Amino acid sequence: MALVERESGELPLLQQAELLSVSRSSLYYHPRELSQEELAVKRRIDELYTQYPFYGSRKIEAQLRREGVVINRKTVQRHMREMGIVAIYPGPNLSRRQHKEHVFPYLLRHLTIRAPNQVWGIDVRHVGAFGIPVKTGKGESKIPLGCWLTWR
């Protein structure tokens, strides 16, 4: 720790540890250097994640085993956690509608449509890059896309 003065004779290590609210054993801990093998595994995990960002620890572990690297899934999880890698996956409750959005009433419920072009509708969406819909908000790039539909 940087706050501990080991050479100073003013306060013993025991009192310094108590003042900093840390255990004495943590004052003597020296992290070990990463081995070349561990660095190579971490590099390969990073390459796999860059290529397949939706792979979790199970798929990365299976891919590493196919490549001949014998590794435990929990070791892969630890490496991913240390590198800050998280698989991309859908979050919970994606099928629930947003309650903050207003639900408009269906005005054609009791209307009988008898002729073509009697009813028209419009659907305006904001489309982001690569055709992926984005939520509107400040600082987001969006392109309004209008679609006219005829119902009959």
Image: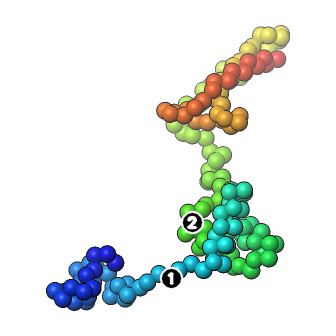
Q: Please tell me which of labels 2 and 1 falls first in the chain.
A: 1
**x 63%, y 78%: residue:** 36
**x 18%, y 89%: residue:** 9
Residue 24 location, x and y as percent? Answer: 33, 88
**In the drawing, what numbered circle is on residue 83?**
2
Q: Is residue 112 visible?
A: no
Q: Is residue 43 above or below residue 96?
A: below
CA distance for labels 2 and 1: 17 Å
Q: Is residue 8 above or below residue 56?
A: below
Circle 1 Cα neighbour tier, 10 Å, few/some/many (<14 / 14–19 / ≥20): few
**x 16%, y 86%: residue:** 10
The answer to whether 105 appears left or right of 116 in the picture is: left
The answer to whether 103 appears left or right of 30 in the picture is: right
Q: Is residue 28 visible?
A: yes
Q: Is residue 20 above or below residue 9?
A: above
**x 51%, y 82%: residue:** 32
Q: Amino acid at mark 2?
A: Met
Front-most of residues 152 and 3: 3
Residue 91 location, x and y as percent? Answer: 62, 53
Numbered-mark total: 2
Front-most of residues 98 and 6: 6
Front-most of residues 13 and 143: 13
Residue 96 location, x and y as percent? Answer: 62, 45
Q: Quadrant of residue 2?
A: bottom left
Placement of the N terminus among the 4 image quadrants: bottom left
Placement of the C terminus among the 4 image quadrants: top right
Q: Secondary structure at mark 1?
A: loop
Q: Secondary structure at mark 2?
A: helix
Q: Amino acid at mark 1?
A: Arg
**Which residue is identified by label 1?**
32
